[in-house]
Image: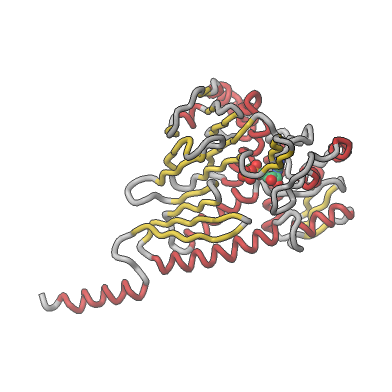
């Protein structure tokens, strides 16, 4: 018996040195980034490593916020937008070039319903402001003149990391894309710190890794129209759940709400969709798709989902009716009574379309 003491002591010392708890448990920290609260939850036996990981994430996110902000400060994206307006090419970081290339790809696949080149239009509607905009909607003639510029991600050209635009009305706003992209990076960064079981959640948009002990992580999707959670879902390693909602940011005038997701074809806010939720391993894709499907609306969302290659989608329309892909239906659990659930008959066509690609 005696001979075991030094060993035990050695073990205790080792555990103290490495900051390990004996058993994994829940740890949680919150950061203020991207103008929202970022909630980081980990299931780990190493709180010290978790602390270091969170500190490093904080720095990464503050930097992304600074550099990828569309209208504030003097980050890379603001400088790029200025260069585009002046007709100059600009060399950007490989990170931003990669982000823009991906955004362009998803914009094409969504028939430009996800169109991050409409920054001027977004600014015109007052959404380039931390405060909710007020007053009447913009002058239709100005909306029309911005549409005539037809800004599109296809106007961007890349030579290595040099970016230029053939259209000076292009102004990039990554508000519908960068969050999903960043959440994926956050999960990777946590893994590099040895935190392999985590959820990174920015106001309901999240990516996950590993699981919660011997069970998968389970999350709730907020009801876009009512109170509480509309549905819950178990997420597995590497999955992201992104929701575009028309309920949080909007402009209100004389009782009418103008949502912050704009239809790039009309220049006006999306009307018939309360929220679109997409699950995918790629956070950026899920974010872009959720925005594009909000614009596509209850009639067209299936085609756009097929084109983007997303198969787990939930759309809630203005009446609270829910539209699902069969794959989404098979995994979500509603937490409230839903009057009408339409499961898309899309699966067959979806498979055919994917084969035909
Ligand atoms: P949420 O903020 O609810 O996650 P989104 O991901 O759809 O919603 O992001 C909305 C933001 O994206 C808007 O505030 C605006 O900056 C930008 N945006 C609005 N409409 C579009 C669009 N059609 N394509 C690309 N970006 C858009
Ligand atoms: Mg989005």
Residue 319 vertical position relative to residue 269 in the rendered view, above or below: above
Which quarter is ligand 1 in?
Answer: top right
Q: Nearer the viewer, residue 288 or 253?
A: 253
Q: Residue at x 71, y 37 (%)?
A: 258
Which quadrant of the view contains residue 355? top right
Q: Residue at x 47, y 39 (%)?
A: 229
What residue occupies the far left of the structure in this picture?
Answer: 1
Using residue 87 as the reference point, say whether residue 1 is left or right of it. Answer: left
Residue 178 placed where, x, y %? 64, 50
Q: Quadrant of the C terminus?
A: top right
Note whether residue 32 is visible.
yes
Residue 280 placed where, x, y %? 53, 41
Residue 309 vertical position relative to residue 66 in the rendered view, above or below: above
Which quadrant of the view contains residue 274? top right
Q: Residue at x 73, y 44 (%)?
A: 116
Using residue 72 as the reference point, say whether residue 145 is left or right of it. Answer: right
Residue 77 vertical position relative to residue 146 in the rendered view, above or below: below
Residue 309 placed where, x, y %? 59, 34
Specify how the rendered protein is coloured: secondary structure
Count of labels in the image: 0
Residue 153 placed where, x, y %? 77, 43
Which quadrant of the view contains residue 344? top right
Using residue 45 as the reference point, say whether residue 53 is left or right of it. Answer: right
Q: Residue at x 78, y 47 (%)?
A: 123
Note whether residue 105 is visible.
no
Q: Quadrant of the N terminus?
A: bottom left
Q: Nearer the viewer, residue 53 or 277?
A: 277
């Amino acid at each position: 018996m005696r001979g075991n003491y030094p060993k035990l002591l050695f073990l205790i010392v080792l555990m103290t040195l490495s900051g390990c708890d004996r058993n994994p448990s829940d740890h949680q920290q919150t950061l203020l980034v991207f103008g929202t609260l970022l909630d980081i939850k980990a299931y780990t036996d190493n709180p010290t490593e978790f602390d270091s990981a969170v500190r490093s994430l904080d720095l990464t996110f503050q930097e992304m916020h600074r550099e990828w902000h569309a209208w504030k400060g003097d980050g890379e994206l603001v400088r790029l937008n200025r260069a585009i307006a002046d007709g100059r090419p600009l060399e950007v970081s490989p990170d931003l070039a990669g982000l823009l290339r991906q955004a362009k790809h998803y914009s094409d696949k969504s028939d430009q319903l996800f169109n991050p080149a409409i920054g001027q239009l977004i600014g015109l509607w007052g959404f380039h402001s931390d405060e909710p905009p007020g007053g009447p909607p913009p002058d239709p003639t100005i909306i029309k003149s911005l549409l005539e510029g037809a800004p599109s991600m296809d106007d961007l050209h890349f030579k290595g990391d040099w970016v230029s635009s053939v259209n000076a009305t292009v102004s990039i706003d990554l508000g519908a894309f960068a969050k999903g992209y960043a959440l994926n990076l956050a999960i990777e960064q946590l893994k590099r710190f040895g935190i392999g079981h985590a959820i990174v959640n920015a106001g309901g948009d999240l990516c996950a890794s590993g699981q919660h002990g011997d069970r998968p992580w389970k999350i709730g999707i907020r009801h876009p129209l009512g109170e509480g959670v509309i549905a819950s879902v178990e997420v597995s390693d590497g999955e992201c759940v992104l929701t575009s909602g028309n309920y949080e940011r909007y402009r209100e005038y004389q009782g009418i709400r103008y949502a912050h997701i704009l239809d790039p074809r009309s220049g006006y806010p999306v009307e018939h969709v309360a929220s679109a939720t997409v699950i995918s391993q790629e956070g950026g894709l899920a974010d872009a798709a959720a925005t594009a499907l909000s614009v596509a609306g209850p009639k067209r969302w299936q085609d756009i989902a097929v084109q983007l290659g997303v198969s787990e989608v939930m759309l809630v329309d203005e009446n609270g009716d829910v539209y699902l892909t069969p794959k989404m239906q098979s995994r979500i659990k509603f937490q409230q009574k839903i009057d009408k659930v339409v499961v898309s008959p899309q699966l067959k066509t979806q498979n055919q379309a994917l084969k035909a690609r």
